[in-house]
Image (spheres, rainbow, N blue to C red):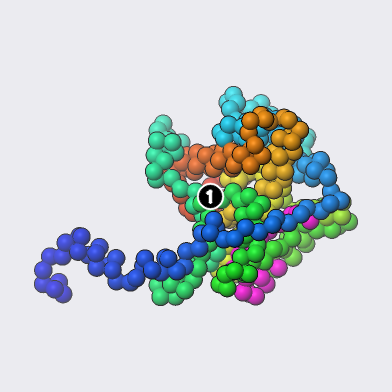
Amino acid sequence: LEKGRIVSDEEIKSEIATRHPYKSWLANTQLILEDLKPVEPRALRRDVSLLDRQQAFGFTQEDTKLLMSPMATTGQEAVGSMGTDTPISAMSDRSKLLYTYFKQNFAQVTNPPIDPIREELVMSLVSFIGPRPNIFDLVGNSRRKRLEVRQPILTNGDLEKIRSIGHTEDRFDTKTIDITYASNEGAAGMQGAIDRLCERAEAAVAGGYNIIILSDRQLGPDRIAIPALLATAAVHHHLIRKGLRTSVGLVVESGEPREVHHFCCLAGYGAEAINPYLAFDTLLDMHKRGELPAEVDANEVVSRYIKSIGKGILKVMSKMGISTYQSYCGAQIFDAIGLKT
């Protein structure tokens, strides 16, 4: 009406696309993890053996031999028969991981919403870590950097790059927060530990940190780990309530996750990237002891395991018609069975 003529769709889109220098903004604000300099990974506590850590995080022979071994060997999820005759976690007489109380939702239709294999073109595991852009402040976004990772499963080296990013990039500052607490507090001390964790996360954001790493590496005889899913969800929702969640990225460094469902739960409750350091250590130990094929070297074992987890996450996302990890992150598409809210 203002111009007194019919404006074509192509002309409208062209005018909007050239209104700001979007390409140069992206070039200046998009930081890619692979471009960062390698950093030596941190060492674990020397007073805690691999077996002790595996027992603390509930690893079983089924986990290592039936689930993780095929993933590291073939780069695919382990195949098994459908159905399970085990009781639900809430009624089991065995101790279960928190992840097992959550069931993935899916679109209950005959035809899957997305085929992650044949429609691979629209699927993406790319994750962005750091402050989210404000859609109402385009000019301000041109100065706000975000870290791009090709897929959300981080190697130990990748995590150290993120932990040390403040030394090379002045617009990033990373804070590692311990999610373990003193063992003498027992189970009754977990609520207080979670409250303190949330307070530390809030203080970190207020202090200018824009990436938080939730880590349970300090696990030991004197330290109990808060379940990674509980810690992640608690911090995620606390920051949302305080209006701070979009100002920070959440990364999880945990020895707990090892199968696809674990990673999906962590992603669904706010983890933008995950480092399953104990899963890597377990696979490397299995490779060293000859329990994995000799023709697959140690680096390839980790690479294939990460690849299989990525494929599994894409499969789970596609069952709800979600095509990108960014959309799945924080979506909370689960039903909890047997948990008190």
Identity, as a three-letter code, of the amino acid under mark 1 = Gln
**Residue 282's x, y, as percent?**
73, 40
Residue ranking furthest to the top: 81
The residue shown at (46%, 41%) is 318
Which residue corresponds to mark 1? 151
In the image, is residue 118 above or below residue 195? above
The residue shown at (70%, 55%) is 41
> Helix, strand, or loop for circle 1?
loop
**Residue 290's x, y, as percent?**
73, 30
The residue shown at (53%, 62%) is 147
Residue ranking furthest to the left: 4
Q: Is residue 213 found inside the magenta-colored segment of the image?
A: yes
| Callout 1 crowding tier (Cα within 10 Å): few <14, some 14–19, many ≥20 | some
Q: Is residue 134 found inside the magenta-colored segment of the image?
A: no
Q: Which residues are magenta?
A: 200-218
The residue shown at (84%, 48%) is 48
In the image, is residue 62 above or below residue 191? above
**Residue 246's x, y, as percent?**
53, 66
Q: Is residue 171 visible?
A: yes
| Front one among 137 and 236 | 137
**Residue 315's x, y, as percent?**
50, 38
* Numbered disc total: 1
In the image, is residue 190 above or below residue 65? below
